[in-house]
């Protein structure tokens, strides 16, 4: 009878130990920082900040996805696995598509008890160098290749005869006149700008293009 009683007393202890053991191997997630402020970024340019995801539990932490509710904010990588005390740096980019204030959230989906963790993202979009809002995406204007090394061709579709001027602006606001009031008939105008860019320092520039009453801006990367 004593043996049976001892066996019955041991069962709760074993169950308690098993439950505590299960708790001890749970993954836990921490994110630092949990808010990212990109400040002011030029329209269609990309700024990058980082946040660190850490597994502070004993189990394996699996991040299955990181989603964004605003396309201007993106995270990379979006999935990974972390063991105890392991960290993963997540790069978060902000690419404003217009001028104004942007607010968004990144949702980190994971297998910890806190299955959804959010990172708040804010940023301000600004048109480059004080330019008025111009058409950065029009198919009527293109440059190639881009990035550029020592050759650059500007192509414009002109609906009517027009005078064309082209200025090159760096990110400090310095302007260099490339072409002034060169007249083209309607159709596709192609201008070889290679001689103007060969000796440029590497960096990012804006081509400010005026064609009659139309104005365009193209981002150019010099390598």
Image (spheres, rainbow, N blue to C red):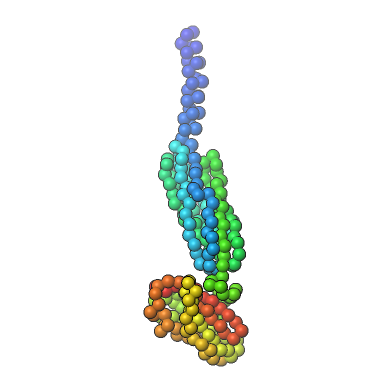
Above or below — where is 83 with respect to 150?
above
Q: 27 or 213: nearer the eye?
A: 213
Residue occupying the far top of the picture: 1
List x then y, in percent, for residue 189.
Answer: 52, 87
Numbered marks: total: 0
List x then y, in percent, for residue 95.
Answer: 53, 64
Residue 188 visible in the picture: no
Q: At 47% from the left edge and 47% from the top edge, which residue is drawn?
A: 53
Q: At 56% from the left edge and 49% from the top edge, which residue is drawn?
A: 118
Q: At 55% from the left edge and 46% from the top edge, which residue is drawn?
A: 117
Which quarter of the rendered picture does the C terminus lie within?
Answer: bottom left
Q: At 59% from the left edge and 86% from the top edge, which residue is drawn?
A: 212
List x then y, in percent, for residue 214.
Answer: 60, 82
Residue 40 visible in the picture: yes
Above or below — where is 131 with respect to 21?
below
Q: 133 or 9: nearer the eye?
A: 133
Q: 221 or 101: nearer the eye?
A: 101
List x then y, in percent, for residue 191.
Answer: 48, 86
Above or below — where is 195 with respect to 24?
below
């Amino acid at each position: 009878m004593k043996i049976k009683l001892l066996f019955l007393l041991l069962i709760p202890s074993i169950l308690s130990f098993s439950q505590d053991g299960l708790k001890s191997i749970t993954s836990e997630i921490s994110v630092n920082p949990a808010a990212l402020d990109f400040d002011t970024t030029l329209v269609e340019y990309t700024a990058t900040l980082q946040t660190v995801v850490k597994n502070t539990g004993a189990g394996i932490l699996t991040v299955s996805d990181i989603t964004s509710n605003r396309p201007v904010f993106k995270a990379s990588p979006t999935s990974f696995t972390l063991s105890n005390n392991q960290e993963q740096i997540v790069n978060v980019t902000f690419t404003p598509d217009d001028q104004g204030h942007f607010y968004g959230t990144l949702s980190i989906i994971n297998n910890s008890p806190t299955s959804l963790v959010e990172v708040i993202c804010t940023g301000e979009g600004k048109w480059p160098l004080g330019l008025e809002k111009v058409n950065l995406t029009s198919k009527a204007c293109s440059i190639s290749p881009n990035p550029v090394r020592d050759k650059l061709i500007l192509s414009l579709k002109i609906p009517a005869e027009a005078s064309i001027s082209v200025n090159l602006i760096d990110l400090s606001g310095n302007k260099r006149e490339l072409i002034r009031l060169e007249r083209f008939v309607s159709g596709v105008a192609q201008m070889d700008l290679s001689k103007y860019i060969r000796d440029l320092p590497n960096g990012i520039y804006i081509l400010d293009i005026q064609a009659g009453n139309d104005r365009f801006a193209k981002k150019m990367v010099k390598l």
